Structures are given as structure tokens and as C-alpha cells.
Image: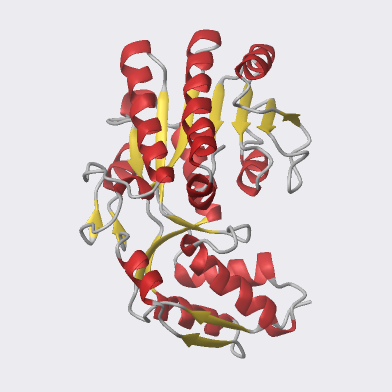
Amino acid sequence: MKTCLITGGAGNLGCQLTWAFTDRFDRIALFDVADGPVGLIAPFAVYEKVDLTDEEQTSRLIAHYQPNVVIHLASLLSGSCERDRRLGWKVNMGATFSLLEIVSQCCNAMFVFASSVATFGSDLPSIVSDDSPQWPDGLYGVTKMAAERLGVYYHRQHGLDFRCLRLPTTISRFAPAGAVSALASHAFLESARNGSFTFRTRPETEMALIYVQDVLRAIVGLSAAQASLLTRRVYNIHGISATCREIADAIVQQLPRAILHFEPDEKIVSLLESWPGRIDDTAAHRDWGWEPNFDLERMARHFIHETVSRTDPLSGTS
């Protein structure tokens, strides 16, 4: 029985991956500490409440499921890492090390890791390449960078088929509240739900973005790629580069009555403008045919009309 294991499986991304992998696996096991998944999962998927920091429990369940592919999505995000650094390190690094060790010894499955452009830090060139220097500012970025290196070590020294995606800011309806990285997501969400949004940025502030639907496609694409074609273990992927003015215009195109303002907060502006506005993902295009499906206009239309506001009067749908 061909099996995929997804950690962080209670989240929106994990739930949606069960449907994206319908044709590739006979069974999907979702591992997470939450009581249950946030959304519908495919009929052949099973959910296990698992604390990945409990190495004994994790090892026992991996031995039971014997996965062919492990998709490692579980992590504490930036704010949580800064509020509790010990827990951030325990979850993002300790659990990742344990998982890599268990998988390499128990089943030697393909290991796909979700990393982040947060590994690069701030004050970056306008276009960031796969091999740009990585000097992360926050603990979240530090743990992601270290996990990338750890995975490459397991590939080189222990033969593990480690593959990694570095994701830019993801546009999703489940974006964390209050996170600066979620600003673009909340611009869409609040405009659809409340009819207005205030950008705490400058109109010309540029952001590197990717729509959640394209993230799913990237994970599926990299996991399906022929190993002999991969020239590296860690790949940047990119979706959209857009200024906040362009994001606002895309929202108004879909929601003409939405009211959008710009009231720059210098701290937020400084943080966002220290991040890359454009990401070079040439290697992903070349090696495994990566191409995003969603430009800004298509993403805005899909996110607002298909995902967020089917019953919202501003959208004109019911």
C-alpha cells in the first residue's frame, strides 16, 4: 500500500493535500497535535493526534504506517517562536531532527520539507536566488535554515531523498491573525468580509507572494519529480511580485465597493521592505517544470469569489 505521511496535517494545507494526492497514494496519514483537521480530508486519509516532540510515539506510528513519502509541514510560526523560544526550537528543530532520524532508519521514505524565504533575513537584494546568503533575523528563520542544512546532511551522508521548497509569503484564508507576513491575505479577507481594509504600508511596497493553490501544486510537483533530474535539494519557488497598490487595485476590481486606505506604519514598512520583492526560481522551472498557475488577477478572483465571499453582498454572489 503506497502511503504518504503529512505532518502538520490538521492545517488547511495538509487537508487540501489529501485531495491533491488522490491519484498518487492509497492512504494518507495526517499527524498533528490538534484534536482534528480544520477541513474536509479525502476518504482514504486517516488522522492521528501525534506530538512530534514525543519521539517514542512518533517512531511507533511511522513504523506502523511505513510511509513512502513524508511531507513535513509542522512548525511553530514566527510569532510563536519569539514568544517561546525553547518551544520553538523543540518543535521546529528537535522534532525535525527526530523525524529525519526515524525516517532514515525506519523506512527511508522521500522527505519533503516546507521551508521559507525567512531563512534569508533582511536587507536583501531585490531578487533573491537559491544560493543567496542566509542570515535570518528571527528564530523561525533560523530553525528553517538549520532544518534545510540538516536535511541536506541526511541526503549526503545517509542517502535520504530529501527535497525542500522555500516558500514566499502565502496567500491563504487561514493566514495567522496579526502577522505582518499575513498582511496581503488579510487585505483580501477583510475587504470581502467587512468592505474595507487599511494598508499599513506604502503603496509602492513590493511583496513576493504565492497563492495557496500554487503551494499545493509545488509540493505535488517536487514530490513527483524524477530524482535524476534534481540538481539541488532546496528550491526557491515564486508566484507573484506585486506592490501593495497593485494588490489594492486587484481587490477593487473584484469588489468595486470596497474601501481601501494607506496609512503607513514605519515599523511595518521597514520590515516588509527588508524582505525580497522578487525570488529567482529558475532551478525549479528547469529541473521539475515548476510553473505557478495564478497571477494576481486570477488569484484575486479565485480567492474572493470562490473561497472567501460566496455569501458576502460585496461580491455579488450567493
> Which quadrant holds residue 64?
top right
Does 223 sit above or below residue 270? above
Q: Residue at x 62, y 37 (%)?
A: 8
The residue nearer to you, when weighing 65 against 51, is 51
Pinpoint residue 317: horizontal percent, then vertical percent. Answer: 74, 78
Q: Residue at x 31, y 67 (%)?
A: 273
Does 313 sit left or right of 165 as displayed?
A: right
Q: How many marks?
A: 0
Does 39 sit left or right of 150 as displayed?
A: right
Which coloring applies here? Answer: secondary structure
Does 196 sit above or below residue 11? below
Pinpoint residue 284: horizontal percent, then vertical percent. Answer: 34, 42
> Which quadrant holds residue 17?
top right
Q: Is any part of residue 24 visible from this angle?
A: no
- Give the position of the C terminus as an image quadrant: bottom right
Pinpoint residue 35: horizontal percent, then vertical percent. Answer: 78, 38
Does 306 sit above or below residue 155? below
Q: Residue at x 61, y 46 (%)?
A: 13
> Which quadrant holds residue 76?
top right
The residue nearer to you, when weighing 203 against 317, is 203
